């Protein structure tokens, strides 16, 4: 499923209108009808008051259609126009004139009746936000600023049309205020701002409706749009398991990590790999970790490595025969120590073109050696959280969070690396310029060890034959969706890395 920004949606609309010949008034009628139908599907028994708040632009035009359609169903609907009639232009004016000729009720907001509107908002059962839509940018003007605050203070169910007013479509930024919607009904495709910055906190449940703008135009117009990960994408991209497969069929992976302080991280990665179908896994850990690790994970193979002061020594990997492993994960629990950069250089010198995942403090040692990544012949996957990403780029976490999509894409293309920028709504970027956003996951993942689980799932899928992009798409979904499902039974508080690992097979069963 594609995700679009303001310019993208404008190009799709204009092609539909000018080249395909479908008038904007028809698209507006389709949009308003689809929103009204959505309300009727879920709230047809509502006897309370429905208040439609409309601006002067196309979003307001959708609101005029919605109010008319709901009135036709005999519902108690009132339209409030937040601007003077003289400001309504184009397609919106056509539908406003239809509304007036039907002699349907509306309130024209003025300075004198603002308190009247406040009362209507406070007594509404449902409020339809058709004020600004994708036209919102920068500081809010009056009366929108005041009205948005009134709506957010009300107890009504709030449905936003296309995008909550005040939420910026391209980056999810909220300058000061935005509608906190219970539901957003959006047109053609989800908007990029739904999934960036503050966006997820404002959109509520969202739904895409068809208004006769075909998404096949994305390819025709050569638009480079991010994609939203869906269960259908994961089903299509998951490596399939032949019935006559054996442990060799499903690959042998290597996890290099651990330290005296961080014993559990590589174990989580290995357990997650086993629970997602890997054939064999070897844990390469410091000698001091081996006894405890072996007890916790008897199904794994082990390589106890030379250590110094509870960390791997800078030469610990020199004797490893890396060619026997189909994919490698480096970094879970490895910690920070003198000699870490030399360890990374040695690792890249010994690799044989197989995919490698760099995670956790492995990224710390990689910071000044990104040329190793760029020059490597195989696929390199990095999995930074915002703090690690900021350190890699020598910038601030705020800058990363403000520009998540662009920063991930630029880094991927610059260094020929697959980037998984973790966080609420994780982002995947590939060297070829493809980008994905994962719409799943929530605070249940906010515990130490969750990222190590994700690394293990990625490793497992690589070993089973997925390419780097496929492994990232599928792993981020399985990881986040499992946490959501586990939280339903365990609560958001009670989900642990182990419960995610144990729940992954159930998520796979639902998928297949």
Image: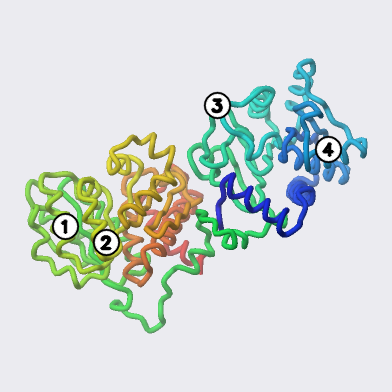
Which mark, by number, is residue 176?
3
* Circle number at residue 285: 1
Q: Specify how the rendered protein is coloured.
A: rainbow
Q: Which of marks 3 and 4 is nearer the N terminus?
A: 4
The image quarter containing residue 482 is bottom left
Which residue position is annotated with label 2?
Answer: 356
* Quarter of the rendering occupied by the N terminus: bottom right
Q: Where is residue 30 in the image (x, y as percent from the top left)?
A: 77, 51
Give me the C-alpha separation between circle 4 and circle 1: 70 Å
Residue 507 rendering spot, x and y as whole percentages = 47, 61
Secondary structure beneath dot 3 equals loop
Mark 4 lies on residue: 96
Q: Distance between the residues labelled 3 and 2?
A: 43 Å
Query: What residue is drawn where x is 63% and y is 38%?
Result: 164
Alpha carbons under labels 1 and 3: distance apart: 49 Å
**Residue located 17% across and 68% down the image:** 322
Specify which label sits upstream in the sequence, 3 or 2: 3
Q: Which of 42 and 293 is in front in this view?
A: 42
What is the quadrant of residue 397 in the picture? top left
Residue that appears at 81% across and 29% down: 85
Q: Which of marks 1 and 2 is nearer the N terminus?
A: 1
Q: From what the image shows, is residue 452 above or below residue 356?
A: above
């Amino acid at each position: 499923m594609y995700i679009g920004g303001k310019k993208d949606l404008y190009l799709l609309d204009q092609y539909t209108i000018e080249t395909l010949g479908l008038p904007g008034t028809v698209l507006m009628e389709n949009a308003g009808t689809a929103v009204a139908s959505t309300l009727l599907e879920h709230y047809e028994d509502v006897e309370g008051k429905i208040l439609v708040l409309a601006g002067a632009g196309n979003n307001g035009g959708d609101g005029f259609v919605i109010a008319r359609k709901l009135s036709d169903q005999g519902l108690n609907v009132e339209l409030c126009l937040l601007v003077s009639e003289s400001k309504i232009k184009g397609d919106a004016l056509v539908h406003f004139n239809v509304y007036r000729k039907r002699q349907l009720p509306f309130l024209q907001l003025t300075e004198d009746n603002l308190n009247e509107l406040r009362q209507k908002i406070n007594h509404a059962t449902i409020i339809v936000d058709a004020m600004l839509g994708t036209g919102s940018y920068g500081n809010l003007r009056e009366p929108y600023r005041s009205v948005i605050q009134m709506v957010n203070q009300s107890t009504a169910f709030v449905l936003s049309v296309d995008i909550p007013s005040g939420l910026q479509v391209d980056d999810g930024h909220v300058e000061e205020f935005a509608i906190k919607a219970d539901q957003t009904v959006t047109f053609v495709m989800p908007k990029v701002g739904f999934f960036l910055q503050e966006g997820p906190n404002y959109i509520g449940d969202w739904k895409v409706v068809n208004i006769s703008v075909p998404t096949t135009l994305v390819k025709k117009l050569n638009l480079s749009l991010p994609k939203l990960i869906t269960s259908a994408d994961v089903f299509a991209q998951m490596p399939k398991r032949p019935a006559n497969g054996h442990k060799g069929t499903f690959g042998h992976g290597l996890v290099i990590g651990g330290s005296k302080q961080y014993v559990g991280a590589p174990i989580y990665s290995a357990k997650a790999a086993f629970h997602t179908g890997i054939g064999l896994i070897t844990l390469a850990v410091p000698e001091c970790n081996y006894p405890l690790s072996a007890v916790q994970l008897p199904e794994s193979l082990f390589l106890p490595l030379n250590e110094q002061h509870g960390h791997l020594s800078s030469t610990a990997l020199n004797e490893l025969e890396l060619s026997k492993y189909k994919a490698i994960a480096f970094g879970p629990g490895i910690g920070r120590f003198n000699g870490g950069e030399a360890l990374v250089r040695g690792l890249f010198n010994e690799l044989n073109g197989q995919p490698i995942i760099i995670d956790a403090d492995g990224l710390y040692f990689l910071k000044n050696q990104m040329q190793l990544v760029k020059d490597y012949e195989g696929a390199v996957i990095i999995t930074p959280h915002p703090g690690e990403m900021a350190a890699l780029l020598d910038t601030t976490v705020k800058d990363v969070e403000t520009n998540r999509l662009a920063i991930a894409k630029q880094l991927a293309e610059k260094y020929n690396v697959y980037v998984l920028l973790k966080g609420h709504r994780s982002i995947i970027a590939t060297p070829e310029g493809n980008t994905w956003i994962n719409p799943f996951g929530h605070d249940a993942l906010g515990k130490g060890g969750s990222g190590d689980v994700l690394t293990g799932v990625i490793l497992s899928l690589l070993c089973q034959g997925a390419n780097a992009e496929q492994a990232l798409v599928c792993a981020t979904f399985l990881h986040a969706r499992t946490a959501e499902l586990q939280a339903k039974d365990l609560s958001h508080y009670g989900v642990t890395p182990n419960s995610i690992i144990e729940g992954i097979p159930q998520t796979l069963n639902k998928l297949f």
